[in-house]
Image (cartoon, helix red, strand yellow):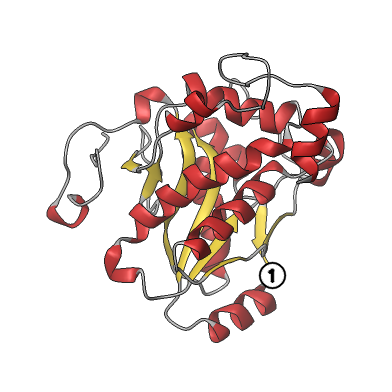
Amino acid sequence: MLDACLDLLLGSSCAVCARPGRVLCRACADGLPSAGRVCWPTPRPVGLALPVSAGEYDGALKALVNAHKERRQFALARPLGTVLAHVVRDLIGPEAADRPVLLVPVPSRAVVVRSRGHDPMLRTTRQAANQLRRWGLDATVVGVLQTRTVVRDQSGLHAVDRARNLAGSMQASGTRLQQTLQRRPGASLVITDDVLTTGSTAREAQRALEDGGATVAGIATVAATRKRLATTATSESLSSLPFSGSGD
């Protein structure tokens, strides 16, 4: 309600088509993806859990992610969360729908959160959990990951350099993680992020969680870079996922 009031008082336009009014007009909202697809990075980080995304990091998805993250259009957290919820639901599959779902957002560095004035991934993940609960799933956001070293800006770095840059940069709160897993036995633990690029960030988050004793079911992202979107089927176990495929 607060976001809607601010939009009304301050004036806004659609982040996708620039039509005056809400930050996301009805037509653009109706065009957002409502399914996930497998999106293995190329090259694929060794041991990376199943990555699933809503679509290409372009067009509407790119506009929404950037407007929410960089321009603090907070009302976009809800539609982005809904997109992410569709991805999570497709990732875990119908056989896991009766088990708890733990969503672990990739952490932002404290200096980045301060400069932006908010944590966009945490906000989006909370909205995704809300949507999943509306669909009847027992979804909880678990912020157990934190950064522990200063890393270089990832912009312009290739896959190998990104992996080296991020190695050892995250840690999981072991006690809190174990307590959560004990309270939610059999839970599907899913890492969430806005964009999958090389998979290095997701793999580092996965490493930190696994070091804490968790098993990661997969990585759910709003978007993935185009060359990493899959187009061909991989196996029967993934055939139920719309547009599921493999990447080499």
Q: Is residue 153 visible?
A: no
Q: Is residue 139 visible?
A: yes
| Foreground residue among 131 and 123 | 131
Relative vertical location of residue 140 with respect to residue 108 in this rendering, above or below: below
Q: Residue at x 63, y 83 (%)?
A: 179
Question: Which part of the image, by quadrant, shows the C terminus?
Answer: top left
Q: How many marks?
A: 1
Q: Is residue 244 left or right of residue 183?
A: left
Q: Residue at x 45, y 68 (%)?
A: 137
Inspect the image, locate mark 1, and give the three-letter code of the amino acid beneath it.
Ser
Q: Quadrant of residue 164?
A: top right
| Foreground residue among 125 and 50 | 125
Q: Residue furthest left?
A: 236
Relative image position of residue 61 (x, y in whole percent): 51, 28
Relative vertical location of residue 39 with respect to residue 11 in this rendering, above or below: below
From the image, tell me which residue sits under label 1.
Answer: 173
Relative image position of residue 99 (x, y in whole percent): 40, 75
Q: Residue at x 25, y 43 (%)?
A: 242
Q: Residue at x 53, y 56 (%)?
A: 131
Relative vertical location of residue 185 with respect to residue 89 in this rendering, above or below: below
Q: Residues within 10 Å of mark 1 (few under 14, many from 20)?
A: some
| Foreground residue among 66 and 204 | 66
Q: Is residue 148 left or right of residue 166?
A: right
Q: Is residue 238 left or right of residue 30?
A: left
Q: Secondary structure at mark 1?
A: loop
Relative image position of residue 200 (x, y in whole percent): 51, 41
Relative image position of residue 232 (x, y in whole percent): 18, 34
| Foreground residue among 164 and 110 | 110
